[in-house]
Amino acid sequence: MLQSINEAREAQVELKIQVQSWKNLLLRGEDPADRKPLIDDLNLHEGRVQEHLSALIKSLSEQRTVLGEDQIDRELIDRAKVLSTEHERLGESYRSALQRQAAVAWNPFELDTLVRGMDRPLDQAIDQLTDALLKRSDTVLSEARAEARQRFRLLEQLLWWAAGAALLLIGILIYRALHQQDPPA
């Protein structure tokens, strides 16, 4: 679960860096020669977000297999897939806005209005998924602790029974040794 939570948070951090890369492109991209490395940086962070979201989906799917379907809700995996799709749409919106801007003079304000605020629902959805993962993690941990306590109680009872049986066996052996008749001489 911790790996899944970390992947979600890493995706969120990279999303924020991607948005910052977009702002850098708006501020510093007026010269077409300067634009290419800025677009490359934007694409780099977009790719990293997708990598973390893919790793999150994989991690949740593996946990579902290992822990069982009742431990990892299919809904969490589906939510992560929706995040990935929504993030792809955000990248498409950035590219579409840049293509529209390529035909006219550089206008960062117009570019910004084309995509302004599109990242916020995605950022909030990642927060909500992470919160759901944290709650699920707490539940799984509580259930594991309860099961461990139950197993400990059972083991404790078995140890007491084994100790009692061992003492009884020792008592029988001592009794037999003391009451064993010496053979006549």
Image (cartoon, helix red, strand yellow):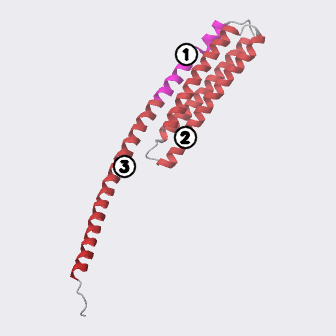
Q: Secondary structure at mark 3?
A: helix
Q: Which amino acid lies under the numbered mark 1 shown in the image of this protein? A: Gly
Q: Indicate yes or no whether the magenta region holds residue 117.
A: yes
Q: Which amino acid lies under the numbered mark 3 shown in the image of this protein? A: Ala
Tell whether 31 sits left or right of 53: right
Q: Residue furthest bottom?
A: 185
Q: Position of residue 90 (x, y in %)?
A: 61, 23
According to the image, label 1 marks what residue? 117
Q: Indicate yes or no whether the magenta region holds residue 118.
A: yes
Q: Secondary structure at mark 1?
A: loop
Q: Position of residue 124 (x, y in %)?
A: 49, 23
Towards the viewer: 20 or 84: 20
Identify the disc placed on residue 4: none
Which is more foreground, mark 2 or mark 1?
2
Residue shown at 49%/36% (left/top)? 2
According to the image, label 2 marks what residue? 59
Which is more foreground, mark 1 or mark 3?
3
Mark 1 or mark 3, earlier in chain: 1
Q: Which residues are magenta?
A: 108-129
Q: Which image quadrant is residue 84 in?
A: top right
Residue shown at 64%/15% (left/top)? 22
